[in-house]
Structures are given as structure tokens and as C-alpha cells.
Amino acid sequence: MFAKNIRMNTYEERISLLSEMIAFAIVDGELHDNEYDFLALVAEELNIEKPVFLELFSKRSEIIPIKDEHQRIMQFYRLALLMHIDNVLHEREITAINEIGIKMGLNPMGIRKTLKAMEQSPNRMIEPSYLICAFEEQHN
């Protein structure tokens, strides 16, 4: 699924990725069942034990920056999917996703293009090739 392509080198990096996703999921002040289910699936695919997963909701892990650009793009996409999973877009989520993308070092034009394509998609998903192109075309 979304986490299988992740080539995290260490357990700490996988914990960091999941911790960032949990923090983003509750940026609107609540955690919906669909968001929890999505996070639990990602945790399972990252081989993070359920007690550790549950602990991340009360204890924030240090965020370890992702070095590889493709991995950063995929993490941004996972966060954007998480943002849409409850079918309610909060202003805080939109602001947070943009800030996170910028902090990841992603191009703002690629961020906007990706979010717009997801908004226009009936299931909020976009093709991986489109996702990568949205960011790589900004390199020229």
C-alpha cells in the first residue's frame, strides 16, 4: 500500500514518519475513525507494534528529516490523503499541509499542483507518475 515503498533505514525513522502523520491527523482537534484506521494500516506496514503505535498518540517522537526527495514527496502525499480521509477539510489542515511541505523542502508550486489534483479527483487519489511530475517539473 502507501508504506510498502518506504525504504526507511531505521526503526527511529519509521517511528518519526508515523508520529508526524499522527500529529497531522489531529491538527483539526479530532481523530476520526477513518483516520485512525489509515494510521493503523500504515503502522502495520511499517512493522510498528500496536503498543508503540498507541503510545505515539500521547508521546511525540522527534521528527527525523527524510533525505530522499521521492520519499519526502510520498510522505507529503500520505499526509494529503490523511487530510482528505474524513471528507472534511479544515483550514488548519490546509495551512498545516502547506507548512509541512515547505519544511520538507518541497516546491510550493508542486505542493499546490498536487493538492489541486487531489481535490479534483473523485477518490482524492492521483497517479504516482503525476505526483512525481508535479514536483520534478519545477526543477527546470
Image (cartoon, grey):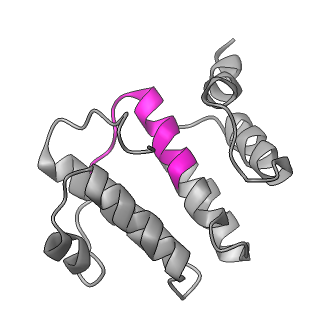
Relative to 77, is 68 on the left or the right?
left
- Please state the horizontal and vertical placement of residue 2, each as a whole percent of the image: 45, 44
Relative to 41, is 7 on the left or the right?
left
- Please state the horizontal and vertical placement of residue 105, each as a whole percent of the image: 50, 38
**Magenta run includes residue 69:** yes
- Please state the horizontal and vertical placement of residue 125, each as a whole percent of the image: 68, 46
- Please state the horizontal and vertical placement of residue 48, each as a whole percent of the image: 19, 59
Residue at x-position 49% and y-position 49%? 103
Q: Quadrant of the C terminus?
A: top right
Viewer can see residue 50: yes
- Boundaries of the magenta span: 64-78
Along the line of sight, the residue nearer the viewer: 101 or 88? 88
Along the line of sight, the residue nearer the viewer: 50 or 135? 50
Image height of 79 relative to 76, above or below:
below
Magenta span: predominant SS is: helix
Residue at x-position 49% and y-position 68%? 24
**Magenta run includes residue 76:** yes
Residue at x-position 67% and y-position 22%? 133
Along the line of sight, the residue nearer the viewer: 136 or 40? 40
Quadrant of the rendered structure where residue 29 is? bottom right
Viewer can see residue 102: no
Image height of 121 relative to 138, above or below:
below
